[in-house]
Amino acid sequence: MSKLTPHYLRLNGIPANASPSAEAVFFWRDPQGTWLPNQGNHLSQVEQVCIQLHDAFAERIFNTKAAYWDFLRVAPELLSTAGMNSECPITKEQFSNLLPQLSTRLPINRALYLYDCRKLVSSIQECSKEVMQLQGEFYQALNLETLFFPEVNEPDGLRWVTSPVVTKIFALLGFIYIRLHSLLDYSTKLAIEVENLKTEFAKYPRLSSKNCLYGDRKRVSFNGKAGTLFEQCVELSQVETVRNHLIHDGLLDDMPKVYRVILRGVCVEKYILFPDLSDEGRFDSFINRNLFYGGEDKINLRLPSLVASCQFRLVQTLQSLLAKLSTPVK
């Protein structure tokens, strides 16, 4: 890292070279260049339980670990990559023509279904990484990038800025919410699949969760369970509300802007205002208007806690699914 680059990013948009208070949430840069929060990062727990889910799926679908490992010794690679991975450059027609030519002694349909199930787990892993990366880039831009060029001397007071950098900051914020909602969709698919796992492989089976989304969570046996992604709560309602607004209705601000507080000629705070939310986590609305800012909610001050809470709920959800998948079939 350059000596000129501050070592820590703070939630108020003002970077620091000295480590902030241990009680405060701040971001530090890991050796790979990713800005990570000093607390509330559950990504390693997500990865750990996902690895266990990959193994549990293999054991359940192949009946034993030994049977799966025996299959791996002779398995054609295209069973795990075709139609899912850019490293397998074949068309749908080529794939469908190749499958009948593979040895009938191999459990082809069983393997195809296993890798389809594992893809649900992999999607959760990659999406979780994206959320953490996007959050780090959001705070990097808010703390380190020049919001307006050329820079000018500003009188004391409150100022707002709009610029290409501000546009990027809002795009990062919006995509964080979109990907958090993706985790809700993926987790619902995974839960439905775990609870409706296929056992017949005379033909290549269709996923039980195909075309399912978060709105189908009522099909999950532990829908509403406290501490999971299926609990009805303000945080998850907020994620749903913001994602749906961004996808279907537009931006979070008619004119995206970052506010700057200037004191004695120096910027001492930057923040982004978030629309007012009801007690249920929905936007306060009046006829056609649903972007009110009377609460002066500074989203940059609470975004890490929202992400951390969603991550924690994800871990609890995945652990519940792992327990179901690991329970012997009677």
Image (spheres, rainbow, N blue to C red):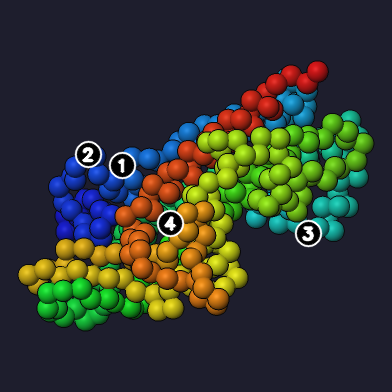
Q: Residue at x 16, y 59 (%)?
A: 4
Mark nearer the N terminus (2 vs 3): 2
Say whether disc 3 or disc 4 marks the residue closer to the N-terminus: 3
Look at the image and tell me whether residue 243 can be seen: yes
Mark 4: secondary structure: helix
Q: Spatial distance from mark 3 to mark 4, Cα to Cα?
A: 33 Å
In terms of secondary structure, where does tag 2 sit? loop
Q: Based on the displayed image, in which of its 4 quarters is residue 80 positioned? A: top right
The disc placed on residue 22 is: 2
What amino acid is labelled 1 in the image? Asn
Mark 3 closeness class: few <14, some 14–19, many ≥20 residues within 10 Å: few
* Image location of residue 205, percent across then percent down: 85, 42
Dot 1: element: loop
Cβ atoms at labels 1 and 2 below 8 Å apart: yes
Provide the residue designation for mark 3.
Answer: 91
Secondary structure state at the residue bearing disc 3: loop
Amino acid type, label 4: Leu
Pointer 4 residue? 134
Question: Which residue sits at x=38%, y=47%?
Answer: 305
Which amino acid lies under the numbered mark 2 shown in the image of this protein?
Answer: Ala
Contact between marks 1 and 4 (CB within 8 A): the answer is no
- Looking at the image, residue 247 lies above or below residue 102: below
Q: Is residue 297 positioned above or below 76 on the image?
A: below
Mark found first going from the N terminus, 4 or 2: 2
Q: Amino acid at mark 3?
A: Thr
Q: Position of residue 315 (x, y in %)?
A: 52, 35
Residue placed under numbered mark 1 in the picture:
38
| Total numbered circles | 4
Number of the front mark, 1 or 2? 2
